[in-house]
Every structure is written in C-alpha cells, then in structure tokens.
Amino acid sequence: MLDFLKIACVVPNLSVADCTQNTQEILTKMQQAEDTDLMIFPELCITGYTAQDLFFDTALQQNVLSSVGKIAAATAGKKYVLALGAPLVLYGQLYNCAIVIADGKVLGIVPKTFIPVYNEFYEKRWFSSAADLHQTEVYLPQLCATPIPAGNDLIFDIAGFVRLGVEICEDLWAPVSPGTYLALNGAEVIVNLSASNETILKREYRRGLVVQQSAKTICGYAYVSAGNTESTTDLVFSGHSCIAENGILLAENQKRIESDYILKAELDLGKIRADRAKMKTFKDCAAIYTKAQSARFITTDLPLNGGCGDTYPVKKYPFIPQDKKQRLQRCMDIFEMQVAGLKKRIAVTHAKKLVVGVSGGLDSTLALLVGYQAVRQLGRPACDLVGITMPAFGTTDRTYTNACKLMESLHIAHVVIPVKEACLVHMRDIGHDPDVHDVTYENVQARERTQVLMDYANKAGGFVIGTGDLSELALGWCTYNADHMSMYGVNAGIPKTLVKWMIDALVAHDHFPESTAVLESIMETPISPELLPPDENGKIAQKTEDLVGPYVLHDFYLYHMMRYGFAPAKIFALAKHAFGDEFSDADILKWLKTFYKRFFSQQFKRSCLPDGVKVGSICLSPRGDWRMPSDASAKIWLEELENLKI
C-alpha cells in the first residue's frame, strides 16, 4: 500500500427544499465519483443551505431522513466513505449536520459547532451548536436500528488506513476549530462541508484558511462549498472547492462561480505521517490540548478503493520550482543565504584572503561567485579572493580555459599551480604505477589539490572555501580528506540539479556582467571530476553520471528519503510516475540500488564535514539535520528493492 487517498469534492446542482431532486443529483454524482476513497458533498446539500424557515417544517425534516436512507443504501458494497450535509432534529433541537456513511451504514453524525449570526448569516435562528448536544449517540430508527454516534469529537478510522475528521463551514473560521482538536487527537484528513457565499476576495481568503490549516495541523484538508444553484435571493454561492496537504494546495476548481462538478485529488498520507512523527511540536501540542478535548474513534473495516498515486503531483525536480519567476527568486534567495553565511565566517576568523580551487566546473564556479559577492559586499578589494587552478592529468582545455577566463573577468587574484609533477613524485614515493588509472591514481590528484589549497590559505592568512554540493555528500562522490574537506562549505546545502540554475539566475539578474559568456559556457560543460586523462580528442572522458547515475534521479531519491523517510518501494513507485517517459523501470531501480549502497557506505565522510550553510529542508550536516552511524547496514533497504517486480 502506497498510502495514497483519493478524495472527491462533489458539488451537485440542487433545487432548494426539493429533497427528492437533490437526492437524485447526489446519487448521480456518487456513481461518477465511485472510484475514489472519500467523497464529500456541501453543507445542507440535501435541502439546500438557503431553505431558511423551511428547515422547521416537519415535511421537509421527514424527507431529509428518507433521502439519507436512500443515499446510505446506495453505498452498500462500495469501497468509499461518503460525507454529506443535512439538517437533523436531535433530541428536539435542529442541527446542521455532516453525515458520514460507508457500506450502507451511517457511521456517525457531526453537528456544526460554530453557528454564525453576523452580517448576512442568521443560522442561530434555525440551528443549535454541537456544544448543545450533550448526548453522545442519537436514535434515528429511519436510518439505523441501533444508536448512531454523534458529536464534534468523532474520528472515523477507516480500516486502519486513514483517520478522518469532519467540520462544517464556520468551524474553519473559528480561532480554534474542531478540526484542530481532531487533528491533535489523530485525524490525518479533515473535511469541511461548507456553503460559503461569494463576495469580492472571499475565495482567496478561504483558500488561505484551508492551506494554512493543513499546514498548522499537518493534515490533508478538503473543502467543498455549495454551488451557484442555491437561492440567489440575497446571496450568490460559488461552489468553491479546494484540497490541501501539509500547507500545499493540491487542487482547486477553476471557475469563480460554478456548480455541477467533481474535483478530485490524491493525498499522500505518508507525508502527513512523516511530518507528524518528525515535528515534535505537533506531539507536544497534542499532549497539552487533547486534555481539553479528547476524541471518540468510530471504526470500520471497509476496504477502500485505494489510491495508487497516479494523479498525485510528483515533481521530477523537487528542489527546483517549475515556474521560472519562482525559480529565479528562489535561487537568488539561496545565493543571499550563502553569501551571508560566508561573510559571518570571514568576520569571526579575521581572514585576510579567501581561497577557492577553480576547476571550470559548476560547483567551483558557484563557490567562487559566492566568495566574490561576499568580498564585494564587505567593501574589500577583489584581490582578497584567490582562485587557484591546478591542472593535472584529466584537465581539458575547455575547463582550464573557462576557469582562467572566469577569474580574469572577475579581476580576482588568479594563481595557476600545476600538480602533475607533485602527483608523480608522490606516486613514486608510495610505489604506485602512474599508468594504473585506479582509485589511488585519482585520489592522489584530489588530495594534492586540497593540500595546495590549504597550505596556500595558511600562507595568505585566509581559509579555503569548499565547493562540494549536497548531492556529492549524499553519494560520497568526494575524496576523503580532499575535496571532501575545507574551512567552510558554501555549497553543502545545494543539490547538484540546482547548481546550474543558481548560476543561470545570476546570469539572468546580470550580477556578473563581464562574466556572462564564460558562465554560459560553464553551464554547458559535462559534469566530471577530471581525474582521468581526456579522450583522443582532448575532451572529457570521465563523466560522473555515467559512473554513479543521473543526478536528477539521485536528487529525487535523496529528497523523498530525507524529507519524508519513504521506503524504497514507495520511492521507486514515485520515480516511475515522475520519470517513466525518460528512464526505464530497470534503470530507475538500478540507480536506486546504487543510491542506497553509496548513501550508507559513505556516511563516514559526512560524519566529519566542515561547517556549511543550510539553505533548504534537506541537510546532511552531522551537527544539524542528519545523524547516522557510519557503520549502519543498508541490508533491509536493498532487500526491499531486490523483492520488487518490474
């Protein structure tokens, strides 16, 4: 089970006070949405919200019970839960209720708690509050031979798969809503049956309430409102519906005024559960406030249809906004954070110089630009930033030329220190044949370069800025005590898939106008450590993604493992959904295995990382977000992948 719940917000046409016609409309919509797990209809949809004093009429009240009975009977044998609104007389008082139905039975009745009586609202003329209902069960023989649970404290546990809470319209507007208590008591999804009339800017306000409530209570929140076939005597109803999850809007109807439609979306219950388990503030809040109001659990063993995530919005690039304007702004915000962190480090160390190893690749370019901006903002001369190029056996003309052009365009101190000879001497000293291009051959170069940087920084009275990025740290794609090490890692929180867009944003904002041409060339350069000799044409022969896999996949895996703690099978399913048109299932699985093997085996490198600024929700610092033993076993993760069928 992948923990997806498919929800339908259903807004039928209705005829005010015509229960028979409204019931038929509801039954028709139920057939159209029966592939979902949870179906919700608007407030008072059986009668219409605008029936006014007709609510008191006993003929209408009897028709309501008959309609609920017909609707309940239609759910027999179906694999979904239904919630719809109706007025009910309970113990001599009239209540605005949400009725929760499954498999032919009424599971529970939730009366509205907050009854508005201001501006255009006069609901207290007709309805009592859930606070006035002192009984926990009601007896309605027209619907059920046994008492039905009733109250605003009900949580519906559906086969152990999802816990559902219900509130009605104004309840959401209250400073502390019933849904808040339900969430703290364990409800993972809150539905709101509403009949909110439309006024200027009210749609935006409602959307904000829904999104914010889903964020604060870490839940899925589905809101459905009465459509424009309600009475227009004094008000217009718009049929506004929206579905949010953990502060993210997943779906919303598009028309400003609408009726007769179904809005569907899938919720990822795994995300809700992961965030609740991780964010201890939620648990602490629950411990305090559930003492004030507990909940009653209504259980059913009804098996749901079960969402598979095929309609859930899965982003290929979880670290990168799809909208260009948002992406540019996000990149510039991150750049500011990188610069701010570096400036503070310069201040506390009283560094005279900043030293960066410049390879002509993306990571070192971004680190250099961060260093340049920090020096510039501090009002110091550009020569306080020292870029060192260290050509070795794998350096190509393209990367060397780009590195030199970039430093020249910035007018910083530019030093070229070839390390071939030093590497040959070292290999001779340790008895390594330089014609054997193995890991020793590669790491000799990486460690020699780091030694040069460190020693030069000591000589100049400064420190080394690290260039390695988040993705490299996750995969351990860095040489221990070489490019793995620095005095401050400005890229430690930047995933590889974002680095290019960071540089692109700086070009778009014309931050470094004299460097535009060379920056564009660097962005087009293949990712490579350049530790093996170039090919016969002098081009890069060692391409990182050919060896460890596509970074677009690894960043996807990293995000879903770190952010939500998803199991390998779920990550594989999400990756198939996101990349099915780009990679085969076999390749997705192959590189996912590589990810887990490397992530576990390379923890020892992350356990001794230098300081580096955190910029997003994913961070691998051993002093911050990620604590893991270096000798942890990846066995159960890899076994789960071995058992997958593709």
Image: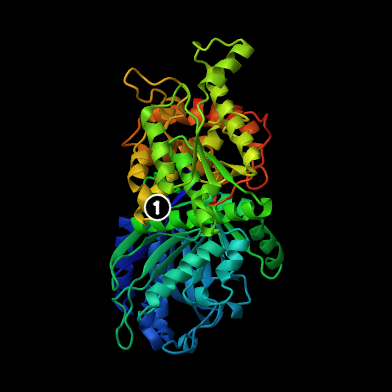
> Residue 611 is drawn in which quadrant?
top right
> Residue 182 is drawn in which quadrant?
bottom right
Instruction: Pick the quarter of the image with the C terminus.
Output: top left
Q: Residue at x 31, y 81 (%)?
A: 236
Answer left or right for 326 relative to 592.
left
Q: Amino acid at mark 1?
A: Phe
Q: Is residue 141 above or below residue 605?
A: below
Q: Is residue 240 visible?
A: yes
Q: Is residue 437 above or below residue 447?
A: above
Q: Nearer the viewer, residue 315 or 13?
A: 315
Q: List x then y, in percent, for residue 617.
A: 54, 51
Q: List x then y, in percent, for residue 415.
A: 50, 36
Q: Residue at x 52, y 48 (%)?
A: 383
Colour mode of the rendering = rainbow
Answer left or right for 532 relative to 617.
left
Circle 1 residues within 10 Å: few <14, some 14–19, many ≥20: some
Q: Which residue is mark 1?
A: 512
Q: Nearer the viewer, residue 490 or 410?
A: 410
Q: Residue at x 60, y 81 (%)?
A: 132
Q: List x then y, in percent, for residue 320.
A: 42, 49
Identify the secondary structure beneath mark 1: loop
The number of discs equals 1
Q: List x then y, in percent, for residue 122.
A: 45, 88
Q: Residue at x 30, y 56 (%)?
A: 32
